[in-house]
Amino acid sequence: MALHKSTEPPPLSPTHCYTQIPSQHGEGCVLPFYGHPATLFRCRWPVTTTVLLLLLSALVYVCWPSDPMVEVVRLRLNKIRIHTLPIINVDLSLYVTLKVRNLDVYSMDFTSLDVAVKYRGKRLGHVRSDHGHVRALGSSYVDAEIDLRGISVLSDVVSLLEDLGRGTVPFDTVTEVSGKLGLFFFGFPLKAKSSCEVLVNTHSQTIARQTCYPER
């Protein structure tokens, strides 16, 4: 009775996983047997996926829109007039220079920029600037003049005169920016608001101290 030979190869024993090659000293060196490329690809796939996810997360973080930073770089008293009739009141004229910083990787166009000035918690006046353009990762300066007329509350007048006598006047500014961020043919709406506490040195007409923070 004839026996049929099996066509399947015998299973690999542990000795088949290594190849012995001769060495110069007569002793053999054993080299490991490398697996199939498909097995290596399956082993490297989780590492490749992790790297791609990290790169995608970094790209989203860099391209995610952020609010611009607005700070007062110059606040100068132009004119001060004190009226005694019919009541005591003070007129002020302020010259303000704002620095708008774009922290995004695409350009910014603002349609309006409104600056309000407060003195000891009371709003004195505001000024609005027209449209402007700030390049990606760049800065732009905006100049404005604010006329504050008729500061007639006696406590405010007395406090202002005392601050002028000391040579430092504290002001609060609230800046609102509206516009859009541009990326190729797309535009993202932009609206930001920031507040600054500014201490002006009236002798040198410079900012002695400033603290700015965004408002939500």
Image: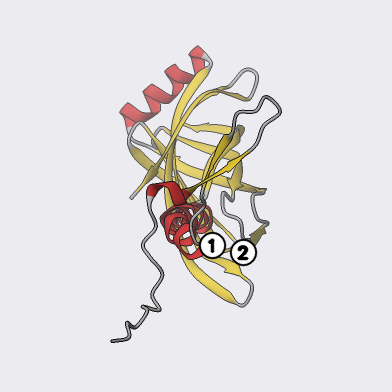
Residue under numbered circle 1? 112
> Would residue 88 appear left or right of 137 to someone viewing this image?
left
- In the rendered image, residue 156, in percent from the top left (x then y), is placed at 35, 30
At 32% across and 86% down in the image, what residue appears?
2
Secondary structure at badge 2 equals loop
Q: Is residue 37 above or below residue 70?
A: below
- In the rendered image, residue 150, in percent from the top left (x then y), is placed at 44, 42
At 54% across and 62% down in the image, what residue appears?
112
Mark 1 or mark 2: which comes first in sequence? 1
Residue 121: name its quadrant.
top left
Q: Determine if residue 33 is in view.
A: yes
Q: Is residue 42 above or below residue 158?
A: below
Residue type at tag 1: Ser
Residue type at tag 2: His
Label ID, residue 189: none
The foreground one among 11 and 168 is 11
Which image quarter is the N terminus in?
bottom left
> Would residue 92 appear left or right of 131 to someone viewing this image?
left
Q: Using a 10 Å C-alpha cutoff, classify the residue at mark 1 as few (fewer than 14 neighbours), some (14 to 19) or many (20 or more).
A: some
Asked if disc 1 and disc 2 are in contact, CB closer than 8 Å, the reply is yes
Q: How many marks?
A: 2
What is the spatial separation of the Cα atoms under label 1 and label 2, in whole angstroms?
A: 5 Å
At 71% across and 28% down in the image, what residue appears?
24
Q: Residue lying farthest front?
A: 1
Q: Residue lying farthest bottom?
A: 1
Residue under numbered circle 2? 131
- In the rendered image, residue 151, in percent from the top left (x then y), is placed at 41, 38
Secondary structure at badge 1 equals strand
